[in-house]
Image (cartoon, grey):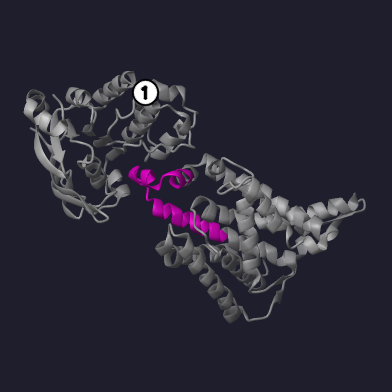
């Protein structure tokens, strides 16, 4: 039972980290229908820039803010330079964003060096609690809490605020939103920047969790993010959360019980969902 | 004194390789209902879309309230006080009636909420189904919601595209009553195939054929002109 709880918490924390990445993708891919493989690049830039600011300032919170600002700025650049010319064309989106992903990864090596960088958990989040025979790592609980808070914020914004309604309306009928007097391009730019900031935020939180950051980690997590969005249902935050937890738990348990299948389990999950429920596990996606 | 609110001067529009509008001449007078008439495919809907900036004009001018709005963006044009009710109603199907209205409201002022209350008196079905998703409304209710959204702001001009299309006669009657009521507060340009409805509501008409204005005048004149109706509308 103790082992089960440990694996469960581990899987939940990993799932929440994937959710933070997938939340941005849910906005960009699920709602705006943009296949942005550069999302992983924003994730890794978030990790590096956040850790750089954290090291410089000595404050993990300031580091997180640094990562979020980096995500916003890179999101703006990506949307303006890379995405705007290819809206509505998936093939071109895949090609150009994959290329940009490589550029972002290589730029990491130029700016921060080619070697991986070890990262420590901030002192106040380091250590663990012992509950009976179960060891609960503090940083994992922190990630789980942050994931749930972010989920709550997004649900609230999308369902209860005017900007959320505009985003949902814009996804359904961009033209109609425009003739109601709303500059939908500006709204979608903001959505894209928010999604990018979420990726960067996820990258920053991932850094102490994995203990090391490296330039190529973006692609690995971007693929996980896409898997989660597909399993959860396009544009569904609830779906992304559930799918991320599912992927996290599956990875955690499989890595212990069937280690040779641990890398394949996500693909198997996605294949099963695509065969039996191609719209994703959680329907009525655009309602959040 | 009759004030011209909107003027289309030799308007031409291309959609892809097609030359849809080839010279639309039109004037909407403040406080009136101007009806655009013509056969299917004549260019009536494209005329409204060109006014809204959705299918930008390739030649000619759109003058609204003294300003040239030909090259403006759709959201900019809407913010000048032009409301648009498209042919397909453009309802956000996953949003409730209330949420559809919220998206449409530009400035949340007391005046707007008073207007919303007035609209809900005009369309009691919307009040009844306030929390219902737009996609679950009937055709008539969707039409009412679409008109309500366009009308709720301080719109000086409303463009309404085929409001009677696909609706049962009893619902058409309700829509007509609503437009007659809205006419008291705003200027309306109406595209309508149903000549009985158009002739009852309209003050003036403009006949469009093959993307060109071929005739215009008062609705009373058209009602009495059997030859014109037969030639361009296939009536009589």
Q: Quadrant of the N terminus of chain B?
A: top left
Q: Is residue A197 left or right of residue A143?
A: left
Q: Tell me where residue A91 appears, x and y as whole percent.
A: 48, 63
Q: How many marks?
A: 1
Identify the residue at horizontal 15%, vertical 40% (top origin).
Answer: B209
Residue A212 vertical placement versus B17 (above, below): below
Q: Quadrant of the C terminus of chain B?
A: top left
Q: Is residue B216 left or right of residue B200?
A: left
Residue B208 vertical placement versus B73 (above, below): above
Residue A186: say if magenta: yes
Q: Which is more toward the observer, B136 or A191?
A: B136
Q: Kindly indicate the quadrant of the structure image that contains residue B167.
A: top left
Mark yes or no: residue B192 visible.
yes
Task: Give the farthest residue toward the right.
Answer: A133
Give the structural element (helix, strand or loop) at label 1: loop
Q: Which subunit holds the residue at mark 1? A: B
| Pointer 1 residue | B123
Residue A126: say if magenta: no
- The secondary structure that dominates the magenta segment is helix
Q: Is residue A8 left or right of residue A88?
A: right
Q: Tell me where residue A145 appears, x and y as whole percent.
A: 71, 51
Task: Give the residues drawn in magenta, as a range.
Answer: A168-197
Identify the residue at horizontal 81%, vertical 55% (top origin).
Answer: A253
Mark yes or no: residue B5 visible.
no
Q: Tell me where residue B141 appears, x and y as whole percent.
A: 39, 26
Q: Tell me where residue A103 appears, x and y as whole percent.
A: 53, 75
Q: Which is more toward the observer, B209 or B80?
A: B209
Mark 1: few, some, or many residues within 10 Å (few <14, many ≥20)? some
Q: Which is more toward the observer, B37 or A167?
A: B37
Residue B212 vertical placement versus A73 (above, below): above
């Amino acid at each position: 039972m103790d082992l089960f709880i440990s694996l469960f918490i581990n899987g939940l924390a990993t799932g929440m980290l994937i959710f933070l990445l997938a939340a941005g993708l849910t906005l960009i891919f699920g709602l705006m229908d943009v296949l942005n493989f550069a999302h992983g690049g924003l994730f890794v830039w978030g990790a590096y820039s956040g850790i750089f600011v954290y090291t410089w300032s000595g404050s993990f919170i300031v580091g997180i803010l640094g990562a979020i600002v980096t995500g916003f700025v890179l999101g703006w650049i990506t949307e303006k330079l890379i995405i705007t010319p290819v809206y509505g064309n998936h093939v071109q989106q895949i090609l150009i964003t994959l290329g940009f992903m490589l550029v972002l990864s290589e730029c990491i090596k130029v700016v921060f060096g080619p070697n991986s960088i070890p990262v420590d958990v901030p002192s106040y989040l380091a250590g663990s609690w012992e509950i009976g025979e179960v060891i609960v790592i503090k940083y994992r609980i922190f990630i789980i809490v942050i994931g749930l808070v972010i989920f709550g914020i997004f649900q609230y914004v999308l369902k209860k605020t005017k900007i959320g309604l505009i985003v949902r309306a814009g996804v359904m009928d961009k033209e109609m939103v425009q003739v109601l007097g709303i500059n939908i391009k500006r709204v979608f730019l903001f959505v894209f920047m928010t999604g990018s900031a979420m990726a960067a935020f996820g990258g920053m939180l991932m850094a102490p969790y994995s203990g090391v950051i490296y330039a190529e980690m973006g692609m690995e997590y971007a693929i996980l993010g896409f898997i989660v969005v597909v399993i959860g249902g396009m544009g569904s935050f609830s779906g992304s959360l559930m799918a991320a937890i599912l992927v996290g738990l599956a990875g955690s348990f499989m890595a212990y019980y069937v280690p040779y299948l641990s890398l394949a389990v996500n693909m198997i999950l996605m294949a099963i969902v695509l065969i039996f429920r191609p719209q994703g596990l959680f329907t009525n996606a655009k309602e959040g | 004194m009759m004030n011209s609110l909107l003027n289309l001067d030799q308007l031409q529009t291309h959609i892809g390789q097609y030359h849809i509008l080839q010279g639309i001449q039109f004037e909407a007078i403040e406080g009136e209902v101007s009806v655009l008439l013509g056969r299917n495919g004549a260019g009536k809907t494209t005329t409204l879309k060109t006014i809204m900036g959705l299918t930008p004009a390739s030649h000619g001018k759109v003058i609204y309230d003294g300003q040239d709005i030909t090259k403006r963006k759709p959201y900019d044009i809407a913010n000048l006080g032009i409301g648009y009710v498209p042919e397909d109603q453009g309802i956000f199907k996953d949003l409730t009636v209330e949420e559809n209205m919220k998206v449409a409201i530009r400035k949340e002022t007391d005046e707007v909420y008073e207007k919303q209350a007035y609209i809900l008196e005009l369309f009691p079905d919307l009040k009844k189904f306030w929390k219902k998703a737009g996609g679950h409304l009937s055709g008539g209710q969707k039409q009412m919601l679409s008109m309500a959204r366009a009308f709720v702001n301080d719109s000086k001009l409303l463009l309404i595209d085929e409001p009677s299309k696909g609706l049962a006669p009893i619902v058409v009657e309700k829509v007509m009553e609503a437009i007659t009521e809205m006419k008291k507060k705003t200027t309306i340009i109406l595209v309508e195939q149903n000549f009985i409805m158009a002739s009852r509501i309209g003050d003036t008409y403009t006949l469009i054929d093959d993307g060109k204005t071929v005739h215009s005048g008062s609705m009373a004149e058209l009602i009495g002109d059997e030859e014109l109706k037969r030639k361009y509308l296939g009536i009589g």
